[in-house]
Image (cartoon, rainbow, N blue to C red):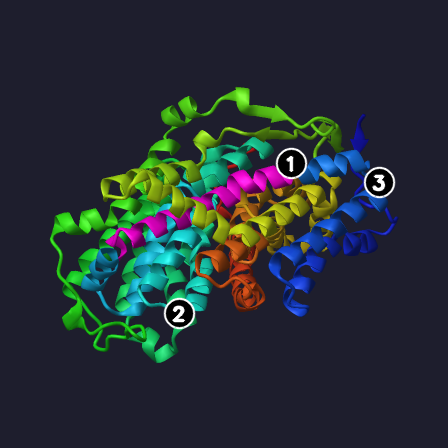
């Protein structure tokens, strides 16, 4: 049985779009206004999506159920798994006493919480985004900041803010490769264009982070470090994306920024040290040998090394197997997308990849087990720690299942495409609002790669119709999308879970929302500037 998506089922595109927005509106209304528990709000949004997909958009209920079930499986494997294993890794570090060594090693560089924020949330978080992506940067960095004495709510929100500009090249460049596959545009040109849009934001992101935590006076006190971290990251992000390849952009930029900060903090320190409340005096901070520091960091170093190794193309080829990629019965190639979203009617794939070996979460789990054994934890104790972690995260995992189920129902029913099509009607303002399409896509799907898969070709088709450069607008989708990462429901659940702020998801959302909108507007302004005032910045498109 085949079914064709209908992008205007009510005969009025504004009305059809309003209806398409109801599932996500229901989720956030329950979360922010009614202050429901996050899994209950997610369930309500998912049920609304199921009802509208079937009754308004006409999708057969069997297909709706298959799409929702596919979303739940994807959410458990691709999102929940990395959360569970990241928190397990953190628990291993705490139980073996090594987390204390890690904290003291960071304090040895600087006891100033403004600088600790940049080192962990910005530099280390970007490295984690580049190697594995998923929820690892927010989950691991958030746990780390709490261990350093940060307020848990502050740790949750600041890690969400930090995990923005690096996302376009997350998981070894997956979003850019996805954009290439759906648009047919050259990967090198898309990576280069994205690398000309985002570095200005990367350069100011450390300042933005610190100013979000403290006032202007305290921010100005550390401006030299903010310049070093921001410019070193942005400069390498630009260079690698434009003159090398797309897979290692985040990894190299993060390492360069981290090393630049370590070297700079050896010769400079702020006049006033701003410590976290309750931080012990410096006299109680132990000095450790290089060996002890490496041992202390071993759980995270080992996990990061395994993530990095698993992302290597040769290793990934060994880990990936088509035998575990299963078409979803009744859904695979049964849903048809039609113009103007695609040039010609196209059957939508629906394949579930059950290969857990290739997931970043599995690398983190192995790193946690191996480091736990090396640090003296018995296998039984490791098993109990893992079991306790799963039980602790139960409500959050339930919420993720419903949220991703909602996203997949809206995707296959075409509701999210309806919302994107609304923004294509903005004419000369399209460069700005086209950037907002990417933001919307990540807010709906939870991933920049998902937004690129959903709206990448729509961006190309619309750009060509309006006489804009398709390279610019396809890249704008990915660049704008990264600013939606902090407000998507899955990311908020990850941050609240990792920082023990379950129940405060509405507050987290309200805090990061204006940051998300402001940063997206900045990216939209950059894209508009390139489109009309600086077209020479755009790499040559296939047409010339």
Q: 524 or 167: which is nearer to us?
A: 167
Residue 96 included in the magenta stretch of the image: yes
Image position, residue 329 (x, y; %):
70, 26
Which labelled disc corresponds to residue 177?
A: none
The residues tagged by marks 1 and 2 sit, at their Cα atoms, a distance apart of: 37 Å
The residues tagged by marks 3 and 2 sit, at their Cα atoms, a distance apart of: 48 Å
In the picture, residue 413 is in which quadrant? top right
Q: Residues within 10 Å of mark 3 (few under 14, many from 20)?
A: some
Question: Which type of secondary structure does the marked residue at label 3 adopt?
Answer: loop
Tell me if residue 120 can be seen. yes
Label 1: which residue?
70
In the picture, residue 463 is in which quadrant? top right
- The residue sitting at 48% across, 37% down in the picture is 174
In the picture, residue 3 is in which quadrant? top right
Q: Residue furthest right?
A: 11
- For the N terminus, the image quarter is top right
Provide the residue span drawn in magenta: 71-99
Whether label 1 touches label 2, CB < 8 Å: no
Which labelled disc corresponds to residue 151?
A: 2
Residue 460 included in the magenta stretch of the image: no
The residues tagged by marks 3 and 1 sit, at their Cα atoms, a distance apart of: 19 Å
User: Mark 3 or 1 closer to N-term?
Assistant: 3
Tell me if residue 529 can be seen. no
Question: Which type of secondary structure does the marked residue at label 1 adopt?
Answer: helix
Single out the mark in the foreground, 3 or 2.
2
Which labelled disc corresponds to residue 58?
A: 3
User: Mark 3 or 2 closer to N-term?
Assistant: 3
């Amino acid at each position: 049985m085949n079914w064709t998506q209908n992008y205007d089922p009510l005969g009025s595109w504004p009305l059809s779009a309003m209806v398409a927005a109801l599932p996500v509106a229901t989720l956030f209304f329950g979360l922010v206004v009614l202050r429901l528990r996050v899994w209950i709000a997610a369930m309500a949004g998912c049920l609304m999506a199921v009802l509208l997909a079937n009754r308004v958009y006409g999708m057969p209920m069997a297909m709706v159920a298959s799409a929702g079930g596919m979303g739940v499986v994807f959410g458990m494997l691709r999102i929940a798994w990395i959360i569970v294993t990241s928190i397990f890794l953190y628990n291993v570090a705490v139980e073996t006493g090594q987390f204390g060594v890690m904290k003291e090693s960071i304090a040895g560089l600087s006891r100033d919480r403004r600088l600790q924020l940049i080192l962990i949330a910005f530099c280390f978080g970007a490295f984690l985004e580049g190697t594995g992506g998923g929820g690892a940067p927010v989950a691991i960095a958030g746990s780390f900041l709490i261990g350093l004495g940060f307020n848990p709510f502050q740790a949750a929100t600041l890690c969400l803010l930090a995990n923005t500009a690096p996302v376009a090249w997350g998981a070894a460049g997956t979003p850019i490769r996805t954009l290439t596959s759906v648009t047919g545009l050259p990967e090198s040109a898309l990576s280069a264009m994205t690398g000309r849009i985002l570095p200005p934001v990367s350069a100011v992101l450390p300042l933005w982070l610190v100013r979000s935590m403290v006032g202007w006076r305290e921010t100005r006190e550390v401006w030299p470090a903010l310049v070093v971290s921001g410019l070193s990251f942005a400069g390498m992000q630009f260079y690698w994306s434009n003159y090398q390849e797309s897979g290692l952009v985040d990894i190299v930029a993060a390492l360069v920024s981290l090393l630049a900060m370590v070297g700079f903090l050896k010769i400079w320190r702020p006049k006033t040290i701003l410590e976290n409340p309750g931080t012990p005096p410096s006299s109680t901070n132990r000095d450790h040998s290089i060996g002890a520091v490496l041992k202390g960091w071993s759980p995270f170093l080992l996990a990061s090394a395994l993530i990095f190794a698993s992302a290597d193309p040769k290793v990934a080829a060994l880990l990936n197997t088509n035998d575990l990629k299963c078409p979803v019965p009744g859904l695979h190639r049964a849903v048809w997308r039609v113009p103007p979203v695609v040039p010609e009617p196209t059957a939508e794939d629906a394949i579930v990849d059950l290969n857990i070996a290739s997931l970043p979460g599995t690398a983190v789990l192995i790193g946690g087990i191996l480091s736990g054994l090396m640090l003296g934890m018995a296998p039984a104790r490791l098993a109990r720690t893992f079991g306790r972690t799963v039980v602790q995260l139960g409500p959050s995992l339930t919420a993720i299942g419903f949220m991703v189920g909602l996203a997949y129902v809206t995707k296959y029913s075409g509701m999210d495409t309806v919302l994107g099509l609304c923004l294509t009607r903005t004419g000369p303002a399209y460069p700005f609002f086209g950037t907002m399409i990417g933001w919307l896509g990540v807010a709906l799907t939870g991933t920049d790669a998902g937004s690129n898969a959903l709206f990448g070709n729509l961006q190309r088709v619309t750009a060509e119709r309006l006489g804009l450069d398709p390279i610019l607008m396809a890249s704008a989708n990915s660049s704008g999308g990264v600013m939606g990462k902090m407000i998507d429901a899955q990311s908020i659940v990850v941050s609240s879970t990792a920082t023990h702020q379950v129940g405060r998801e509405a507050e987290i959302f309200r805090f990061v929302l204006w940051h998300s909108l402001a940063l997206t507007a900045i990216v939209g302004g950059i894209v508009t500037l390139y489109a009309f005032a600086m077209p020479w910045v755009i790499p040559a498109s296939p047409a010339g």
